[in-house]
Image (cartoon, rainbow, N blue to C red):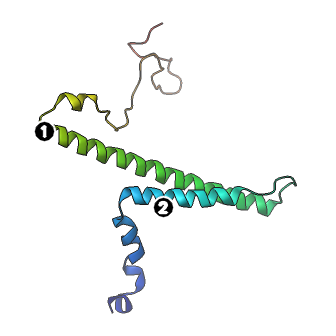
Amino acid sequence: MKKEILGSNKFRDQDLDMIENIPRFTFLQLLRDQWQMLIDKLNGNYSVPPSKSRIEHLYSIVKCIRKLIRKIEITAQLIRKEEWIYTKTYFIQIGKFSQIAHTVNPKKRSGPIANTFCPTKPGQPIKRAKNAIF
């Protein structure tokens, strides 16, 4: 009744709520299945030169694949982050702190790395990282 009074654009779709509430492993499998369907659409007869409309269609499929790959990467990173937090909490609870040091933190690191060039502004001389070997 609220949808009829206020309009359907004011309310979220129930399908979106269901997708957000499923476990991440299941969501990752769902994304993989969608990715596989799009890859199957790309397979075709390439012995003849494609037309302009065919190229545009393939390009739109590739754009969808790129977005889907990014979603898969983000979901995999979230899964790794959750697992790392759970293992860290578990080892703290049982009192084995040395195991925490052996687990790899899934957070990305940024900044200059040894033996690489530091980012500079245009026109400035190139600087090397201080711990670089020449």
Query: What residue sits right under mark 1 in the picture?
Result: 94
Residue shown at the point (38%, 76%) measured from the top left: 12
Tell which of 16 and 25 is nearer to you. Answer: 25
Q: Give, as a three-letter code, the residue at label 1.
A: Ile
Spot occupied by residue 101 in the image (x, y as percentages of width and height): 24, 28
Q: Residue furthest right?
A: 48
Q: Residues within 10 Å of mark 2 (few under 14, many from 20)?
A: some
Q: Is residue 126 above or below residue 31?
A: above
Spot occupied by residue 50 in the image (x, y as percentages of width and height): 83, 57
When asked about the image quadrant of residue 57, the answer is bottom right
In space, the residues marked 2 and 1 are separated at their CA atoms by: 35 Å
Q: Is residue 90 above or below residue 34?
A: above
Label 2: element kind: helix
Q: Residues within 10 Å of mark 1 (few under 14, many from 20)?
A: few
Residue shown at the point (11%, 35%) measured from the top left: 95
Tell which of 111 and 124 is nearer to you. Answer: 111
